Amino acid sequence: MRLQTKYHGEIEWDQDLKWAFENGIPGFPEEKEFIILPLPENEVFMIMQSLKSPDIAFVLTSPFSFFTDYEFELDVQTIESLEIETEEDVQVMVILTVHEPFSKTTANLQAPIIINIKNNKSKQVVLNDKKYKTKHLLLSENYEKVKE
Amino acid sequence: MLVLSRKKGESIQIGEDIEIQVVSIQGDQIKIGITAPRSIEIHRKEVYQEIQSENTSAARGITDLLKIIPKTNKQ
């Protein structure tokens, strides 16, 4: 099917991978289905595009290469609602708030996106750990590493 | 808004399966215990609002995203 997107224009989408957020995400309760689109020449960042609203899309990355000690315990409620059976089925992504210059871009470590890769049920989880905030500078000493 | 007075140890029942109990009171801080089904999400309001607001900023996006974001193709 043809699909309008925020960053990729109109694309042909073959419906195979779709993350399902039963209750949407905070601030966007009506956006319940997102697709993942890669960025050209880029293997670190990706776009999570709402299926319903062309103008709603988020930039995501896997947090662990930027924040090597990032860790948290998933609550039972999330494990049950996503029907998670083993840790291996869990993918963790974080939403970036992109700024120009890119060095000011922040990552929301307080509310990671959790995906059960077995069934694509997903949820943005709000962590209670005070260590993690909504705005962590993504790049610090890592910047050069990413640029290269 | 419905306002009810409660003492320490007393509760409020909301519907069939939500109970809110005043656990302790110390000065201007009140500890509240909540019993609710797991499907009900409970958050500190200011934390939840911050997540909503950060999601809104993140979704606002940026023109020229593709130019700004570093290229990271592995060699």
Image (cartoon, helix red, strand yellow):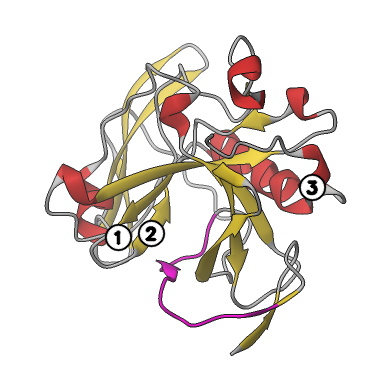
Looking at the image, residue B33 sits to the left or right of residue A142; the answer is: left
Task: Check the residue under mark 3 and report the chain it is in.
Answer: B
Identify the residue position indicated by label 2 in the image: A122
Q: Are marks 1 and 3 on the same chain?
A: yes
Q: What percent of the width, then of the height, locates residue A54?
A: 72, 73
Give the residue type at disc 1.
Answer: Ser
Which mark lies nearer to you, 1 or 3? 3
Give the structural element (helix, strand or loop) at label 1. loop
Give the structural element (helix, strand or loop) at label 3. helix
CA gap, disc 1 and disc 2: 15 Å
- Rendered residue at 64%/13% (across/down): A140
Give the residue type at disc 2.
Answer: Ser
Which mark lies nearer to you, 1 or 2? 2
Q: Nearer the viewer, residue A73 or B73?
A: B73
Q: Nearer the viewer, residue B63 or A41?
A: A41
Give the structural element (helix, strand or loop) at label 2. strand
- Rendered residue at 71%/29% (across/down): A105
Identify the residue position indicated by label 3 in the image: B65
Most frequent secondary structure within the magenta stretch? loop
Which mark lies nearer to you, 3 or 2? 3
Counting other residues with Cα less than 10 Å from the Cα at mark 3, is it few (<14), some (14-19), or many (20 or more)?
A: some
Task: Check the residue under mark 2 and report the chain it is in.
Answer: A
Q: What percent of the width, then of the height, locates residue A14?
A: 49, 83
CA gap, disc 1 and disc 3: 37 Å
Identify the residue position indicated by label 1 in the image: B39
